[in-house]
Image (spheres, helix red, strand yellow):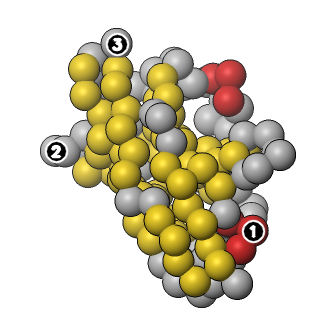
Amino acid sequence: QVQLVESGGGLVQAGGSLRLSCAASGRTISSGFRGWFRQAPGKEREFVAAITWSGTSPRYADSVKGRFTISKDNAKNTVYLQMNSLEPEDTAIYYCAAEFQWKNYAQLSSYNYWGQGTQVTVSS
């Protein structure tokens, strides 16, 4: 089993920044993707960003490209999501996820493990 714990959410004004963290523990995963997804009220959970288990090849949803940066500290087994130029439309619960079979990184169904989520609220 893999446990994922997110932190770093909060309330920020439009144009501000936040950095989310996702710490992994338990079974060591040495393949596949680590991803960030988000779910706004009344909407489906959607892909935000993903990175390989080794911390390379970041991928982004078009809606966050140029504003968000995903990275991974392999020594800490922690994935980060640096969010800049935040907009009210970014308000959501943000979830980190992990899979180890190199499946489609943008699909929810690819991921085996999920964190509990952290709330991000951007005020206008």
Which residue is nearer to you in this view: 41 or 71? 41
Image position of 51 (left or right of 48): left
The residue labelled by disc 1 is: 89
Q: Quadrant of the C terminus?
A: bottom right
Disc 2 secondary structure class: loop
Q: Residue at x 34, y 20 (%)?
A: 2
Q: Indicate whether 28 appears above or below 84.
A: above
Q: Residue furthest top?
A: 1
Whole-percent x, y for residue 89 in the image:
75, 68
Between discs 3 and 2, the one toward the N terminus: 3
Q: How many marks?
A: 3
Q: Residue at x 39, y 45 (%)?
A: 6
Whole-percent x, y for residue 64 in the image:
67, 66
Q: Which mark is residue 21?
A: none
Given this view, does label 3 or label 2 mark the residue nearer the observer?
3
What is the CA distance from the residue labelled 3 to the residue labelled 2? 19 Å
Image position of 26 (left or right of 93): left
Q: Indicate whether 117 appears above or below 122.
A: above
Q: What residue type is disc 1 on?
A: Glu
Between discs 1 and 2, the one toward the N terminus: 2
What is the CA distance from the residue labelled 1 to the residue labelled 2? 33 Å
